[in-house]
């Protein structure tokens, strides 16, 4: 009787929530809900398309006749399908580039598709692209160049009303927008309604960004705003698509604005006042716009893989540009390379060699299974392994049960609690002892350690530096079949 009641009491106590350890306090700035949703995307595309496609230029002057824009076989479906087959989760369209030509029939200018021969002026590229994206389950985003070399009022206060009116059209007519891209390239010579002169503006103050940002927040609360200064995602500081080997999701936005040249974008800043993760933009070809002369220079699947590991694998996102040609379609070579890149990544992620491993850790927060070491295998991002406060350099061991061969280690922090880990090391069990095979710094949203093949039955992760206890959401072990094949 006594035994039974003791047992019952023990069961009650074990199940009682009063013994559950509290989650760690967040560290530093943490992502907003819109940023968390965006982090999940990881890979999406840019579509650079305008008069430049037909004039063979990268920057139009603003004096291009509307009649120049005349794709012979435009297909939003083809573009979207190419993106989807490549594994992209969304597309951002250059609705207006520096030349000022609008891909939608804006009511605020004559310089748009409505005065082009394409579909007898009845077409709307933004409409077709946003519809096709939605139909295919891709997110849709807009690029609206702040610099406008066509507008007569560019450089004057009236231009801001014009810019915001256009932005309002884009944010209210085409459904949910996942990202608004504010380019920093700005000012200089242009057509400017016939003035043909040089107009330089004060990049920091002219655009009154706070007002524009507030408008975007109001009209599209879910939209990320991208620029050299965030506020939601930042430029990575180069157009090669490469994030810093160390890349923090945090930044000090003070004194930054689109076009500011302040440094620190490639690696982020730690400590940083705000959560402003990096986005790596790069084109699949040398140019942002289509040029037939670059048909032989499409990036190979191996080059795209390299970019993926140097962007997504460093906690940033990968924004790859696919420029439609004069038909208004993505050229075959680009479609093929992108699809093969995707096939290779799928092959990598098809098998996680850590799945089913026995996971132990030097410390588990409050000995509570809510924070158990094995949470790093859950793979759904909602669970994490954490340690007691003050335990900042713990280790975690994966016992794989049998020797496995891999060359990629995937790590993710639990982002709602901030970026907590400064540095880590990875060891393999070899000839009766631990031997280090990799080490790194920032983790954040995703860290992919890609190296030589390792064959072992046990892997150890050591957190070597952290200001607070870690909250780690994932460890995965993968192998690149392509590399195995290439080695043979
Ligand atoms: C730059 C622009 O000047 C390029 O033409 C391109 O749009 C690139 C994505 O951003 O600042």
Image: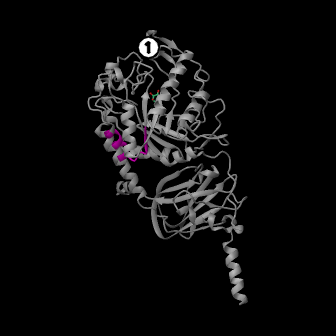
Residue 324 location in percent, x, y?
Answer: 34, 33
Circle 1: is it few (<14), some (14-19), or many (20+) Cα within 10 Å?
many
Can the viewer see residue 483?
no
Q: In which quarter of the image is residue 263?
A: top right
Please report the residue visible at 63 percent of the width from the left and 68 percent of the height from the top: 369
The residue furthest left is 72
The C terminus lies in quadrant = bottom left
Q: Name the residue under label 1.
A: 191
Q: Is residue 337 left or right of residue 30?
A: left
The N terminus lies in quadrant = bottom right
Q: Above or below — where is 459 with respect to 486?
A: below
Q: In which quarter of the image is residue 270?
A: top right
Q: Is the magenta stretch mostly helix, strand or loop?
A: helix
Q: Above or below — where is 53 with respect to 439?
A: above
Residue 464 location in percent, x, y?
Answer: 65, 56
Residue 338 location in percent, x, y?
Answer: 36, 44
Q: Quadrant of residue 79?
A: top left
Q: Is residue 470 left or right of residue 318?
A: right
Can the viewer see residue 46?
yes
Please report the residue visible at 37 percent of the width from the left and 17 percent of the height from the top: 64
Asked whether 281 or 157 is in front, the reply is: 157
> Quick check: is 87 in the magenta stretch?
yes
Span of residues in magenta: 77-91
Asked whether 176 or 146 is in front, the reply is: 176
Please report the residue visible at 56 percent of the width from the left and 32 percent of the height from the top: 228
């Amino acid at each position: 009787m006594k035994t039974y009641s003791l047992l019952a009491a023990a069961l009650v106590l074990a199940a009682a929530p009063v013994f559950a350890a509290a989650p760690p306090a967040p560290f530093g700035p943490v992502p907003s809900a819109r940023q968390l949703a965006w982090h999940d995307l990881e890979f999406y595309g840019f579509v650079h398309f305008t008069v430049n496609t037909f004039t063979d230029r990268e920057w139009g002057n603003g004096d291009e006749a509307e009649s120049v824009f005349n794709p012979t076989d435009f297909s939003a479906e083809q573009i979207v399908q190419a993106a989807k087959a490549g594994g992209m989760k969304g597309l951002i369209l250059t609705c207006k580039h520096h030349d000022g030509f609008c891909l939608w029939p804006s009511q605020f200018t004559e310089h748009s598709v409505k005065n082009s021969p394409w579909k007898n002026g009845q077409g709307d590229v933004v409409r077709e692209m946003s519809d096709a994206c939605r139909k295919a389950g891709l997110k849709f985003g807009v690029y609206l160049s702040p610099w406008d070399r066509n507008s007569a009022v560019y450089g004057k206060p009236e231009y801001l009303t014009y810019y915001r009116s256009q932005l309002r059209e884009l944010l209210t007519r085409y459904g949910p927008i996942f990202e608004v891209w504010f380019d920093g390239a700005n000012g200089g010579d242009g057509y400017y309604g016939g003035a043909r002169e040089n107009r330089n503006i004060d990049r920091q103050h002219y655009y009154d960004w706070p007002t524009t940002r507030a408008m975007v927040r109001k009209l599209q609360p879910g939209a990320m705003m991208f620029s050299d200064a965030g506020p939601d995602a930042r430029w990575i500081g180069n157009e090669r698509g490469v994030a810093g080997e160390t890349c923090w999701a945090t930044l000090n936005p003070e004194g930054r604005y689109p076009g500011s040249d302040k440094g620190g974008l490639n690696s982020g800043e730690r400590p940083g006042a705000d959560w402003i993760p990096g986005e790596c933009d790069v084109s699949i070809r040398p140019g942002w716009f289509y040029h037939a002369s670059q048909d032989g220079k499409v990036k190979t699947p191996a080059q795209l893989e390299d970019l993926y590991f140097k962007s997504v694998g460093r906690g940033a996102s990968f924004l790859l540009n696919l420029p439609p040609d004069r038909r208004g379609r993505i050229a075959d070579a680009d479609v093929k390379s992108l699809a093969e890149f995707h096939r290779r990544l799928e092959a990598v992620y098809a098998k996680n060699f850590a799945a089913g491993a026995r996971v132990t850790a030097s410390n588990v927060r409050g000995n509570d299974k809510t924070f158990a070491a094995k949470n790093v295998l859950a793979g759904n991002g909602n669970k994490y392994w954490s340690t007691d406060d003050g335990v900042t350099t713990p280790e975690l061991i994966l016992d794989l049960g049998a020797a496995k061969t891999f060359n990629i280690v995937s790590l993710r922090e639990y982002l709602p609690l901030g970026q907590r880990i400064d540095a880590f090391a990875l060891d393999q069990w070899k000839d009766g002892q631990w031997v280090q095979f990799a080490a790194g710094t920032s983790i954040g949203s995703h860290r992919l350690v890609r190296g030589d093949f390792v064959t072992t039955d046990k892997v150890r992760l050591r957190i070597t530096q952290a200001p607070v206890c870690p909250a780690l959401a994932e460890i995965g072990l993968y192998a690149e079949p392509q590399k195995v094949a290439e080695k043979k």
